Image (tube, rainbow, N blue to C red):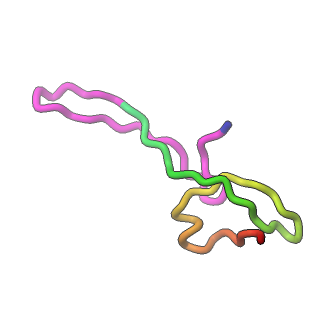
Amino acid sequence: MSVECEICGKKKLKASKLSFSHKHNVYRQSPNLQSVKIDDNGTVRRVKVCTSCIKAGKVKRAV
């Protein structure tokens, strides 16, 4: 199961929290992906799309 948007290619990022003593705690930030049915040239298929692509209207949802 991939953690990547199929429209824009947004995927996990590496980030680090920095404490007062400057100790770095590395963790992963994953995008907000939703499983959505889209209309792809007349065929309906299910893809994982980030919420920013859905909000921007880059995806035509199937009904």
Percent x, y for residue 47? 72, 54
Q: Is residue 33 magenta?
A: no
Q: In terms of depth relative to the viewer, which is nearer, 44 or 20? A: 44
Say which residue appears at 68% left-offset and 36% top-offset.
1
Instruction: Work out whether 11 lies above or below 51.
Output: above
For this orientation, the residue located farthest to the right is: 42
Residue at the left extreme of this rendering? 20
Image-based side of 10 in relation to 25, left or right: right
**How many circles with numbers are drawn on the protein?**
0
Q: Quadrant of residue 58?
A: bottom right
Q: Which residues, given as a range, are shown in magenta?
A: 2-26
**Does residue 37 sit above or below 42 in this rendering?**
above
| Residue 29 horizontal/vertical position (percent) | 43, 41
Residue 56: x, y in percent?
55, 73
Q: Residue furthest front?
A: 63
| Figure quadrant of the C terminus | bottom right
Residue drawn at x 84%, y 63% as measured from the top left:
44
Which secondary structure class fits the magenta region best? loop
Give the vertical position of 45 relative to 27 (above or below).
Answer: below
Q: Quadrant of residue 7?
A: bottom right
Q: Position of residue 39 (x, y in %)?
A: 79, 68
* Residue drawn at (61%, 74%) of the image: 57
Q: Residue at horizontal 65%, vertical 39%?
A: 2
Please say whether residue 7 is one of the residues in the magenta stretch. Answer: yes
